[in-house]
Image (spheres, helix red, strand yellow):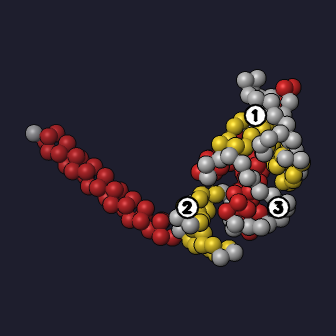
Amino acid sequence: MRKKRDNKKLGLIWAAVIALLMVTSIFGYIGRDSQETSTKNYNGFEFFEDQNNWIVKVGEQGYVLDYFPEELEDIELEAFDINSEKVYVVYNGGGIGQGAQYSISKLISFLNSFGIKSVLACLDENNCLDDTLPLVSCDGDFPVIEFNVDSKTIIFINEECIVLQSTDENFSKLVDKLIYYWLGVME
C-alpha cells in the first residue's frame, strides 16, 4: 500500500515538474522572440534580424540573407545586368565545399524566384565536377556565374562571366552582395 502511495506522489511530482518546464519554456520562447528580433534601416530598406539572418522585404517578397549590407560594403561590384531567361552556374576549384554548395543553392533559388532558369555547367572538362554537365564559355549566348576558389574575395566581370572569387567560407558574402545589388538595396 505504501509503495502505491509513494509511486503516486512521485508521479504527481514529475507531472508538476514537467508542467513547470513547459510553462517556463513557453514564456522563455515568447520573451526570446521579442528580444532577439531587431530592425535596422539601410538605403531606405527595413531589415529584420532573426537569429543569424537578415530579412528584407522588397515589394511583396521577403528575402532571407546571411549578411547585413554594411558588412558587404568593402566588396566592389561592377555594374551589370542579367537580361536572360537562363544563366549558367559554374564551380571551379576542385572538390566543392559546403560554403560553395550552400551559396550556389542560395543563388539558384534567388534566380529561380525571378523566373531565370539556372543550369549547372562547366567551363572546361578538366575542372568539371560532373561529366554530364554542359560545357560553356564566357562568350556564349547566356550569362555565366562562376564560383572560383581563391584566397582573395572579389567579384569581377570577365567577358560574359560574373566571377565570384573567394574562399569556400566567403562565397555566401559574395552571393548576398549580388542579391542586394539585383534587389536595388546596394549599388
Q: Nearer the viewer, residue 99 or 30?
A: 99
Looking at the picture, how far across and down is residue 50, in whole percent?
56, 62
Which image quadrant: the C terminus? bottom right
Q: Amino acid at mark 3?
A: Ala
Q: Nearer the viewer, residue 7 or 153?
A: 153
Q: Amino acid at mark 2?
A: Gly
Q: Residue 79 bears which disc, if any? A: 3
Q: Amino acid at mark 1?
A: Ala
100 sits left or right of 58 in the view: right
Q: Earlier in the sequence, mark 3 or mark 2?
A: 2
The residue to which callout 1 is attached is 121
Task: Please tell me whether mark 3 sits on a helix, a strand or a loop.
Answer: loop
The residue to which callout 2 is attached is 62
Which image quadrant: the N terminus? top left
Residue at 74% from the left image edge and 67% from the top image edge: 186
Residue at 69% from the left image edge and 75% from the top image edge: 43
Residue 183 can be seen in this image: yes
Q: Residues within 10 Å of mark 2 (few under 14, many from 20)?
A: few
User: What separation in Å lies between label 1 and label 3 (alpha carbons)?
Assistant: 24 Å
Q: Residues within 10 Å of mark 3 (few under 14, many from 20)?
A: few
Looking at this view, name the residue that lies furthest to the top: 131
Quadrant of res 126: top right
Instruction: Assess whether mark 1 and mark 2 are in contact (beta carbons under 8 angstroms).
Output: no
Quadrant of res 183: bottom right
Residue at 80% from the left image edge and 30% from the top image edge: 135
Q: Nearer the viewer, residue 149 or 34?
A: 149
100 sits left or right of 52 in the view: right
Q: Earlier in the sequence, mark 2 or mark 1?
A: 2
User: What separation in Å lies between label 2 and label 1 (alpha carbons)?
Assistant: 29 Å
